[in-house]
Image (cartoon, rainbow, N blue to C red):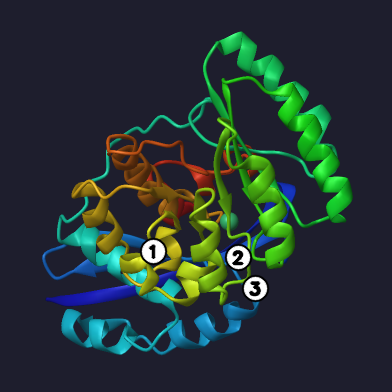
Amino acid sequence: MNLIFKKKSYSFKLSRKVENSKTTYLTKSGWIIKLISNDKKIGFGEVTPLNKEDLKKCAKQLNMIPQYIGVFNLSEQINIFHPCIQSAINSALAEINGKIIFKKNYYFNEIDKTAILLNPENVISDLNEIKKKQSNIGKSVTIKWKVALKNNNEEEASLEEILSQIDNNIKLRIDANGSWGRKIANRWADILKDNKNIDWLEQPLCVDDIDGLTELNKKIPIALDESLLKFPTLIDKWKGWQIRRPSQENNPVNLLRELENKKALISISTSFETGIGKRWLYHLSSLQLQGPTPKVPGLAMNQFPNSFLFLNEANIIWDQL
Ligand SMILES: [Mg+2]
């Protein structure tokens, strides 16, 4: 199969900055790519590296891909490229080959359909806002709290307050983005291990401390996030929750197959994609919810500006960009 390869760059400002213990996101940049096959089938993909430092590398590598290329050569060439480029190309090829067929609509807009990120500056007032909305809809909601942003005493005090204020209808995910040492991680695990509200502790220890993470996972559910990006082979080995980011993995078709095969303990997470990458997030999240361990995805729905970039129609995004 011969292909035409096209790319367009984008940049947008998040509607609210997203802060974690390692970095702050305020703007997001990347590329939309379009592949057209010789029988006129079209596939779109998105190159959206989470680390801004990777943008230059991606730009250089994308410029190395010729406009007219055979599918075999393209697949060979991208093998050594940044995982986000591989993800985008493999996504577009999967669309052309009918390995993924997107629906017209997915339903993740309501607050009970995705995890809600707490504003770390005013955790408690944010929680109260969410509780108000939750009592209006009368459904269970999931909140996510990014920790290791302040000193630990202060955050443990907030934790106590949060726990005293939430009932069974609120689920809690706590994400340290790899910034705790074993001592603090164990303190939190001890406080939370019998708590019914907790979904998991997310990447409590640094990416490399797999032994420490394995030990903690015996005490309380531990979700790996950054460790999976650095060591993708853990995807087949880790006996616990996995935060999966289709736009950061070499081939999101593998993730699609895992979910189709009803693999458990997978949670889908955004890397702040445009509408192009969001199609995968929505599709995979829908499958996740039909699997053995349904959990709402982390899609950061309220972080995006009002723009054509986040429409559901890939063609319109491409044409307007
Ligand atoms: Mg995380």
Tag 3: amino acid: Lys
Q: Is residue 111 above or below residue 15?
A: above
| Cα distance in 3D space between marks 1 and 3 | 28 Å
Q: Is mark 1 within 8 Å of ligand 1?
A: no
Q: Disc number at residue 38?
A: none
Q: Is any part of residue 33 visible from this angle?
A: yes
Q: Mark 1 and mark 2 in contact (Cβ < 8 Å)?
A: no
Q: Is mark 3 within 8 Å of ligand 1?
A: no
Q: Position of residue 56 (x, y in %)?
A: 59, 83
| Residue, disc 3 | 52
Q: Mark 2 and mark 3 in contact (Cβ < 8 Å)?
A: yes
Q: In this view, does 65 lie to the left or right of 173?
A: left
| Cα distance in 3D space between marks 3 and 2 | 8 Å
Q: Does the residue labelled 2 lie within 8 Å of ligand 1?
A: no
Tag 2 secondary structure? strand
Q: Nearer the viewer, residue 135 or 58?
A: 135
| Residue, disc 1 | 238
Mark in the foreground, 3 or 2: 3
Q: Nearer the viewer, residue 236 or 212?
A: 212
Tag 2: amino acid: Ser
Residue at the spot 32% in from the left edge and 82% down from the top edge: 67
